[in-house]
Image (cartoon, helix red, strand yellow):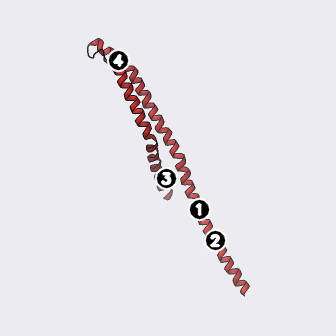
């Protein structure tokens, strides 16, 4: 009788351990999925923000090149001064560089912020 009781106790302990291990495995699996999603989302967001900054810088560069032509034309028709032919590209170029620098500094923060909101949205979707 003692052997049967001992075997029963050992089996109960083993069953309890297996159920705890199974629950831990499920929670670890969910945590690793969330970590993987966060890891994937952040670089994607950084690339998207970087592409936007580069696009704005290219547009600003184009505006810089065109600004001297505009200033030249305005001076010919009498609506601007000849000094704008020189100062307009310098001002526009400086503005483009400043904007690109400011936006570049913001990229990690903005990408992280977007990643957090994406991951929270995914948690809401998976919890339903």
Q: In which quarter of the image is residue 65?
A: top left
The kind of secondary structure element at disc 2 is: helix
For the point 46% across and 52% down, the residue is 121
Residue drawn at 51 percent across, 45 percent down: 42
Alpha carbon of mark 4 to alpha carbon of mark 2: how far? 79 Å
Residue name at image x 51 percent, y 42 percent:
44
Query: Which label is found at residue 86?
Result: 4
| Residue 12 numbered mark, or none | none
Crowding near the residue tagged with mark 1, few <14, some 14–19, many ≥20 C-alpha atoms within 10 Å: few
Distance of label 1 from label 2 (alpha carbons):
14 Å
With respect to residue 107, does 66 lie above or below? Answer: above
Residue 17: image tag: 2
In this view, the residue farthest toward the bottom is 1
Along the polypeptide, which appears first: circle 3 or circle 1?
Answer: 1
Is 68 situated left or right of 111 in this image?
Answer: left
Q: How far apart are marks 3 and 4 (CA)?
A: 53 Å
Q: Quadrant of residue 95?
A: top left
């Amino acid at each position: 009788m003692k052997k049967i009781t001992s075997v029963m106790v050992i089996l109960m302990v083993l069953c309890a351990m297996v159920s705890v291990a199974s629950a831990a495995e499920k929670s670890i699996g969910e945590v690793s999925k969330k970590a993987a999603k966060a890891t994937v989302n952040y670089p994607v967001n950084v690339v998207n923000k970087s592409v936007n900054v580069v696009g704005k810088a290219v547009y600003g560069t184009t505006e810089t090149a065109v600004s001297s032509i505009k200033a030249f034309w305005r001076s010919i028709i009498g609506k601007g001064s000849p000094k704008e032919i020189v100062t307009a590209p310098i001002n526009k170029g400086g503005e483009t560089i400043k904007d690109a620098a400011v936006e570049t500094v913001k990229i990690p923060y903005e990408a992280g912020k977007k990643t957090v909101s994406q991951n929270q949205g995914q948690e809401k979707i998976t919890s339903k």
